[in-house]
Image (spheres, grey):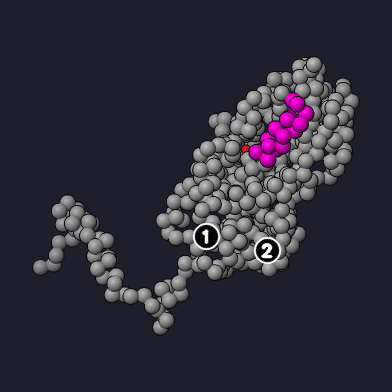
């Protein structure tokens, strides 16, 4: 019996060619799995058309899985509590969707009694790492195949291959951009942007074209770190993200242009548009300023970058990531409240207010007016002791800083 492989299918040129190529070169049977993580929002193509392409390429079946709520409620929600931004910038758009896809890939591999899964990534990117490490974490017995690392075809060769096998692709030989998108945003690579000095062209942006020059102010409500309402209207997280993408994106907010370090040792220039992700993380982080105790807050900030690195590096399903999740989650119990955001075209966002029933902000302690409750006299001894070590050092060793007493 032929070996059966479950392929993570996107409907693009590479994964379409991968179906036929694996059948011809490796003599396997291919089942395609198309996981909807929110990429449908901007797409001009229906899932039926994409399924038909998989079948035309030779797949036994093309299963479509709707994972949009799962993507939001589990993966984006966790990225929110970790204020996740790789290298302080990138909110992990593609990195968050890969473990969702892996989970369904493994699920379908079991359903179809497959012994391997496959992906269409090349050898140069992070996504191969995420697919493979993720699969091994969930199903150590499954083999992972990466035909695009083996076939040695250029893009033009792949187009010829598709034509030869009557696979109805939409791609041309000169593909300009490589775009990956989901609920959390869009990643745009290649074309003119491969020169880090070149200004990115307007053309590939879809979420952040300015269509509204009026300021937009809205209130985002969080409950134990999860955004649950916009302007007091309760809404599912997936819908809230979609709405934020449109409302914030329409004012031009949400673009990033950065050079990042890939896991495989390559620096690459990447352009992203992720209005909802950036606005929600900024609002969440601002609310934490109000409710987290200082030491917890500072320690969390250190661990956030580690969490982001792990997820970027394909370690979603890993012991350290899970341990950090437990820490993050414990800090989030009181992250409940409202944040007011103001967007002004083109691309400016400010947080203009925040409140929480669990705020550690104490007006009586903070104010300089008559309502002041702070015990000023208590500071005298506190500051003396706090500075005692430095005072002793200055007297005995710190002579070069000292000014001699006037005589
Ligand atoms: N550099 C980003 C990341 O590694 C985006 C990758 C986008 N993937 C793609 N196939 N275009 O997460």
Label 1 sits on residue: 288
Quarter of the figure that contains the N terminus: top right
Place residue 380 in its image quadrant.
Answer: bottom left
Q: Is residue 312 above or below residue 140?
A: below
Indicate yes or no: mark 2 CB to ligand 1 under 8 Å. Answer: no
Residue at 78% over, 49% down: 41
Magenta residues (range): 98-114
Q: Up-down: is 19 above or below 50?
A: above
Residue ID for mark 2:
229
Kindly indicate the quadrant of the structure image that contains residue 51. Answer: top right
Queried on whether the Cβ of the residue with tag 1 lies below 8 angstroms from ligand 1, the answer reads no
Residue under the image location 73 percent in, 56 percent down = 239
- Label 2 crowd (10 A; few <14 / some 14-19 / many >=20): some
Residue 93 appears in the rendering: yes
Looking at the image, residue 178 sits to the left or right of residue 290; the answer is right
Q: Above or below — where is 119 with respect to 22?
A: below
The image shows a total of numbered marks equal to 2
At 84% from the left and 37% from the top, the residue drawn is 50
Q: Is residue 405 left or right of residue 297?
A: left
The C terminus lies in quadrant? bottom left
- Along the line of sight, which residue is nearer the eye, 258 or 373? 373
**Is there any visible trace of residue 156 in the rendered image?**
no
Locate residue 27 relative to residue 94 in the image: left or right.
right
Helix, strand or loop for the magenta stretch, by majority: helix
| Residue 121 is one of the magenta-drawn residues | no
Locate ligand 1 by image quadrant: top right
Relative image position of residue 27 (x, y in whole percent): 79, 16
**Mark 1 Cα shell of 10 Å, populated few (<14), some (14-19), many (≥20):** many
The residue that appears at 63% across and 64% down in the rendered structure is 221
Q: Position of residue 326 (x, y in %)?
A: 52, 47
Please tell me whether mark 2 sits on a helix, a strand or a loop.
strand
Distance, label 1 to label 2, CA atoms, is: 17 Å
């Amino acid at each position: 019996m032929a070996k059966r492989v479950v392929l993570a299918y996107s409907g693009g040129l590479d994964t379409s060619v991968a179906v036929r190529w694996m059948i011809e070169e490796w003599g396997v049977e291919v089942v395609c799995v198309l996981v909807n993580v929110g990429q449908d929002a901007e797409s001009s193509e229906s899932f039926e058309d994409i399924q038909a392409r998989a079948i035309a390429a030779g797949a036994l079946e093309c299963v479509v899985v709707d994972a949009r709520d799962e993507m939001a409620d589990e993966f984006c929600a966790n990225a929110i509590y970790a204020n996740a931004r790789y290298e302080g910038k990138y909110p992990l758009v593609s990195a968050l969707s890969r473990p969702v896809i892996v989970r369904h890939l493994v699920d379908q591999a079991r359903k179809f009694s497959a012994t391997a899964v496959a992906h269409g990534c090349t050898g140069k990117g992070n996504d191969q790492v995420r697919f493979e490490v993720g699969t091994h974490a969930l199903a150590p017995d499954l083999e992972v195949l990466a035909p695009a690392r083996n076939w040695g075809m250029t893009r033009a060769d792949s187009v010829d291959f598709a034509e030869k096998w009557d696979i109805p692709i939409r791609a041309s030989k000169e593909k300009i951009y490589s775009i990956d998108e989901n609920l959390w945003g869009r990643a745009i690579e290649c074309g003119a942007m491969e020169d880090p000095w070149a200004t990115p062209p307007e053309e590939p942006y879809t979420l952040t074209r300015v269509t509204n020059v009026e300021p937009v102010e809205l209130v985002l409500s969080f409950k134990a770190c999860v955004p649950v309402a916009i302007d007091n209207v309760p809404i599912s997280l997936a819908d809230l993200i979609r709405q934020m993408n449109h409302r914030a994106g329409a004012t031009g907010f949400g673009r990033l242009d950065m050079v990042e370090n890939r896991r495989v040792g390559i620096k690459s220039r990447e352009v992203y548009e992720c209005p909802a992700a950036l606005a929600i993380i900024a609002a969440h982080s601002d609310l934490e300023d109000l409710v987290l105790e200082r030491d917890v807050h500072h320690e969390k900030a250190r661990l956030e970058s580690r969490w982001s690195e792990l997820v970027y590096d394909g370690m979603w399903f890993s012991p350290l990531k899970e341990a950090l999740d437990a820490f993050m989650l414990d800090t989030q119990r009181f992250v409940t409240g409202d944040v007011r955001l103001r967007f002004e075209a083109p691309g400016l966002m400010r947080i203009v207010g925040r409140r929480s029933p669990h705020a550690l902000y104490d007006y009586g302690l903070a104010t300089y007016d008559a309502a002041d409750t702070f015990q000023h006299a208590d500071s005298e001894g506190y500051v003396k002791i706090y500075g005692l070590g430095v005072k002793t050092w200055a007297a005995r060793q710190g002579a070069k800083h000292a000014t001699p007493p006037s005589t």
